[in-house]
Each structure stands twice: as structure tokens, then as C-alpha cells.
Image (tube, helix red, strand yellow):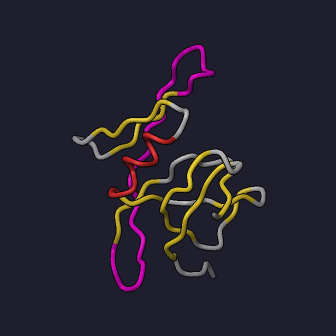
Amino acid sequence: MMRAWRPSRVGIDGHIGPFACYLNEHRWNGWRCPVFAFEQLGAVIGGLPYTLSFEGETREVLETLAEDPDNEVVRIKAQTIFVNDRTLEVWTIGEGWCWEEA
């Protein structure tokens, strides 16, 4: 069973972040897999060296992959988690990136 979500902070390689986020025990290849609430998205989007934007109408985060010659846009949909008896809408930014707990 997956452990509960908890508030935390994450960064990448000590050079990017740290950013407020929520974590549980899920990992990808040993790396953390954070999710970010709406209030945290501005800092994350502005603090990463990737082209990210928030589409208010669809409530999706749009990630443009700079290394993709076709300029593919990845649409990241919100998900719902429960933290301390509260329901939060969150987004998984940088899935598969090397996030570390700060």
C-alpha cells in the first residue's frame, strides 16, 4: 500500500529548486516523484530550464520538449490527492527527472 502524501521540498542536482511539493514513497529509478499544487506551479514553471506554461481553460500544464525537433507539447493533467484530510489538485511536473528531496 502506498504511504500517504506529505508536504516536502525537492530540487534537481542541487542547482534547480528547491520547490515546495508533495511526496509519497513512490520513486522512479530511485528518484523522487513530486507533485505540485496550483500555488506552487508559478515557482516551478519559472524555475526550470524547460518551456512550461499553464493553460487555465483546460487546467493543464504544457511542457514543450526543447530537444524534440517536432516541438511536441506534453499536456499534464491535474490529479487529486489527499493530504491531512484535505483534497488537493496537483500536477506531476518532470516525471522521469532526477528529483531529490531537499
Q: Position of residue 20 (x, y in %)?
A: 48, 62
Q: On the image, which quarter does residue 8 sit in? A: bottom right
Residue occupying the far left of the picture = 57
Q: Name the quadrant of the C terminus.
A: bottom right
Which residue shows up at 37% across the image and 47% down it? 42
Considering depth in this image, is 76 or 48 the residue closer to the camera?
A: 48
Question: For residue 81: magenta?
Answer: yes
Determine which quarter of the picture holds residue 70.
top right
Q: Taking 90 as reference, is 60 above or below it? A: above
| Residue at the image position 59 percent from the left and 72 percent from the top | 24
Residue 56 in the magenta stretch? The answer is: no
- Please determine whether, in this image, residue 83 is positioned above or below residue 40: below
Q: Specify whether 21 is left or right of 58.
A: right
Left or right: 58 as drawn, with respect to 79: left
Residue 91: where, in percent of width, then height?
A: 44, 54
Q: Position of residue 4 (x, y in %)?
A: 54, 81
Q: Is residue 8 above or below residue 37?
A: below
10 relative to 52, above or below: below
Q: Residue at x 41, y 77 (%)?
A: 82
Q: Position of residue 14 (x, y in %)?
A: 68, 51
Q: Would you say 69 lies left or right of 88 here?
A: right
Is residue 35 toward the left or the right of residue 15 in the image? Answer: left
Quadrant that contains the N terminus: bottom right
Kindly identify the residue that appears in the image at 71 percent across and 48 percent down.
Answer: 13
Quarter where residue 15 is shown = top right
The furthest residue to the right: 29
Report the magenta residues as a range.
65-87
Number of marks present in the image shown: 0
